[in-house]
Amino acid sequence: MPRRPITRPTPPSTAARGYAFRTTEAIEAGHTDWSTRSARMLMPTRGVRVLAPPLGTAERAAAFALALPDDAAFSHTTAARLWGLPLPRALEGEQDLHVIRRTARPAIERAGCVSHRGAERRDITRLGGLRVTSVADTWCDLIEGFPRRVHLADAVMLGDAVVERLHPTQWLEELLPQADPSSEQWWSDPAVVGIRPLRDRLIARRTFRGRRLAREALGLVRPRVWSPMETHSRLVAVHAGLPEPELNVRISHRDGGGFIGFGDLVWRRRTYRRRVVGEYNGATHERLPSRDSDHTRRLLLEDDDWKLLEIYSRHIFTPGGRFELVSRLRSWL
């Protein structure tokens, strides 16, 4: 007697994406227990099957969500990835899915899952059909949950990314902060709107492990940061006692001759010896088209009397590189 071909059960409405389904629903739809154990299927977690390997965090989370209690939400590094936030180097290898639920509820015990409590103290939202902690709470949770692996520069980098996620600025060419970050006017500056949710969550959560670090980091978080290495480059200069740069400034020729480009870090006050543009050069800048473009822009900047400060990873992550960078910048300012 020919066997009935195995067909894919219709994924339940709770499956945010992918081909994940609950085995109980497959059996209720007429499939046998044997058919749900087919070698053609994968088991991301107990009671769930998928027909194709999950491609990333969103697919894995969508599959896991089918087996989680309704009150659970994704948090910590999982929420950060779902929000598209860059993780500190020390957390990039964190592959377990982090979930959180109310303190009064039992912990979730599943392989590949880290359970947390305290959802009642977080803002929970939906992202791509999944329950996740708010992006501001995710920032707080990463600082609180990984005290030995998230340091000040990491907390600032994450905060900068949260601000850009909440209030994108890449299409707002001229929206630059006008107020001094240490002044009360800072929080009413229109350019700072994306930082306020971080401050509000710190106030709302009152006390938590890592709050001191979060407060210190908040004082260094800025709008208009478009990459993690821009954060790290800026902090090298600031921690050395050098003036804080403007970020992602539109640069045009002095004589009105046209647009040159956006400067990652810009020092242009009249009190400085020279006008300086700091540019972080990552791996993409090693490719020939990028090198040609970078060389052309360097010539345009120098013709317009700018000094170009080229920044590489060694200038950020090695003592000798930081000393070299700071010394050169100090001589120009």
Image: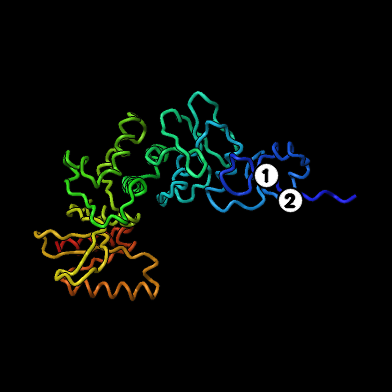
Residue type, mark 1 in image? Thr
Q: Residues within 10 Å of mark 2 (few under 14, many from 20)?
A: few
Residue type, mark 2 in image? Ala
The total number of labels drawn is: 2
User: Which one is nearer the viewer's eye here, 93 or 83?
Assistant: 83
Up the image or down, 96 lies above or below 295; here it is: above
| Residue 232 visible in this rendered orientation of the protein | no
User: Which one is nearer the viewer's eye here, 40 or 91?
Assistant: 40
Up the image or down, 273 lies above or below 129; here it is: below
Mark 1 or mark 2, which is nearer to you? 1
**How far is the residue under mark 1 from the one under mark 2?**
19 Å
User: Where does the image place residue 321, in percent across and percent down from the top left?
Assistant: 28, 62
Q: Disc 2 on helix, strand or loop?
A: loop
User: Which one is nearer the viewer's eye here, 308 or 313?
Assistant: 308
| Circle nearer the N terminus (1, 2) | 1
Q: Disc 1 on helix, strand or loop?
A: loop
Q: Residue at x 53, y 48 (%)?
A: 58
Left or right position of 105 against 162: right
Of all residues, the one furthest to the right in this rendering is 1
- Picture quadrant of residue 33: top right
Up the image or down, 112 lies above or below 208; here it is: below
Residue indicated by mark 2: 39
Which mark, by number, is residue 189?
Answer: none
- Picture quadrant of residue 247: bottom left
Of all residues, the one furthest to the top in this rendering is 104
Residue indicated by mark 1: 10
Q: Residue at x 33, y 62 (%)?
A: 314
User: Where does the image place residue 95, in percent across and percent down from the top left?
Assistant: 52, 47
| Residue 302 visible in this rendered orientation of the protein | yes
Left or right position of 187 against 76: left
